[in-house]
Amino acid sequence: MSSVNELPPRHLLHHEPPIFELGSPGRSGASLPSLDVPAADPRDDWGSLARAEAPGLPELSEVDVTRHFTRLSRWNYAIDIGMYPLGSCTMKYNPKINEAAARIPGFAGLHVYQPESTLQGALELMWQLERMLCEIVGFPRATLQPAAGAHGELAGLMMIRAAHADRGRHPTKILIPDSAHGTNPASCTLNGFDAVTLPTGADGVLDVDAVRAALSSDTAGIMITNPSTLGVFEENIADIAELVHSVGGFVYMDGANLNALLGKFRPGDAGVDVMHINLHKTFTTPHGGGGPGAGPVAVAAALEPFLPRPTVEKRGDRFTLEYDRPKSVGRLRSFFGNWGMFVRAYTYIRELGGEGLTRATELAVLNANYLRARLEHEYPVACTRRSMHEVVFSDKRLKKETGVQTLDIAKRLIDHGYHPPTVYFPLIVPGALMIEPTETESPETLDQFADALLAIAEEARRDPERVKSAPHSTGLRRLDETRAARKPRLRWRPAGTE
Ligand SMILES: *Cc1c(COP(=O)(O)O)cnc(C)c1O
């Protein structure tokens, strides 16, 4: 095990003023030829709409702009730099062939107002992607419109509400396990439903009897994440679906963890009625930093009439946007959705094929269980059941023996050159460290990462204060994360002039 103290710092000092504080009036990155027509005053044409003064933009040379943004980019941790162990996020590598496909001029240069007859290739790609996703998850139809998983949840619940209303029913409650992602109850509230919390069973899976006890004629449906955020397969999902259907409710599956299921389990075959798919998680379109994502939603036949419009239809050998859908919940996204994500996901699915996708799932599960086997003796696992694509450790043992906690471990990992994992989620595991290596990491990378976590445990026993004061290799140490979010300081002041 290497000692982190000997590692060179991998992060640059965080001293870079905002671009508005750089440069000097009159500097420019462009060299335009001198004017060969009479100069015009924009106010002659535009009157008061034209600005009298310069807009106050920063004035810099090309080299200063390039260096500013390149320096900033080097502060960032990125999937192209190293492993990104964030659990629940499926931060897998984004293959560069996806980018090449998305940049094909015929795709990249499309205009949203082009006539349909000139969009045939784009519509065909959307139509094909919908078919491929539906085959993977076992549903007849899907919409590609939602811009992310949470937006997909909104779409799915809108369809559930519309389907109930179509039958003259107005149930108000959605059952949600206590291990759910925060977006699930938020989507319920946005849709005017009340979220009813279901306790996770002692063995980490949803208990059929607990669901039965919570059901009533006021149950609109249930939202189940499968595998759950504990990284465990909800093996009772088919029985639960039958129960929920028996009171007229619908089953929504949060498909953010689909990376664990490709080629192994099709939610549509288990009685699920509607699910979202995060293309930016399972299908290698880039994410982080707020998007763009894409959260297609697949539906069973009962919900098909309520799909957002327009849908993409094939008529003969032509592809067309269908707006005439009287029961549709309406449009959820301007134009076509995050189109570039569709090209990337389509490319990935075509590149791997069914066998490749199945293998990706097998390796994702293997990698998570490999880390579990290497780390479990220092970092107890929250759930004794076999892990799927991610594993939830806890700080229970180290905290008791050394006082070192999850946040300290996460910060010390930065010194070892890794992005910290997801911490303190799911909420039902005290001191959770949620790790999802994904299938794209090699055994060597997994070993290095496990070594770093074991080195931190060893250091916690030898020198706990060193771990508690991490990170040591960054320009800034422990930030007040709440204040940084609520009261961001956007002007740069040199260190020591607070
Ligand atoms: C990521 C995630 C979501 C939300 O998806 P976004 O694409 O980030 O909106 C919902 N549920 C679970 C379990 C997730 O991991």
Image (spheres, helix red, strand yellow):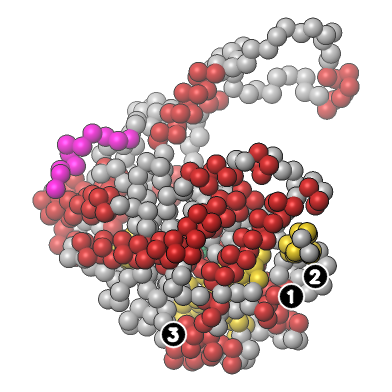
Question: Is 2 within the magenta?
Answer: yes
Q: Mark 2 and mark 1 in contact? Answer it, CB < 8 Å.
A: yes
With respect to residue 173, does 12 lie above or below?
above
- In space, the residues marked 2 and 1 are separated at their CA atoms by 7 Å
User: Tag 1: residue type?
Assistant: Pro
Q: Nearer the viewer, residue 353 or 230?
A: 353
Is residue 259 shown to the viewer in this render?
Answer: no
Instruction: Please tell me the numbered disc located at residue 305.
Output: 1
In terms of image quadrants, where is residue 72?
Answer: top left
Query: Residue 455's spot in the image, x, y percent?
Result: 17, 51
Which residue corresponds to the image point at 46% horizontal and 28% vertical from the top-left?
70
Q: Earlier in the sequence, mark 1 or mark 3?
A: 3
- In space, the residues marked 1 and 3 are separated at their CA atoms by 28 Å
**What residue did someone put label 3 on?**
236
Q: Mark 1 and mark 3 in contact? Answer it, CB < 8 Å.
A: no
User: Tag 2: residue type?
Assistant: Arg
- In space, the residues marked 2 and 3 are separated at their CA atoms by 35 Å
Q: Mark 3: is the Cβ under 8 angstroms from ligand 1?
A: no
Q: Earlier in the sequence, mark 2 or mark 3?
A: 3
Q: Nearer the viewer, residue 428 or 91?
A: 91
Q: Nearer the viewer, residue 143 or 358?
A: 358
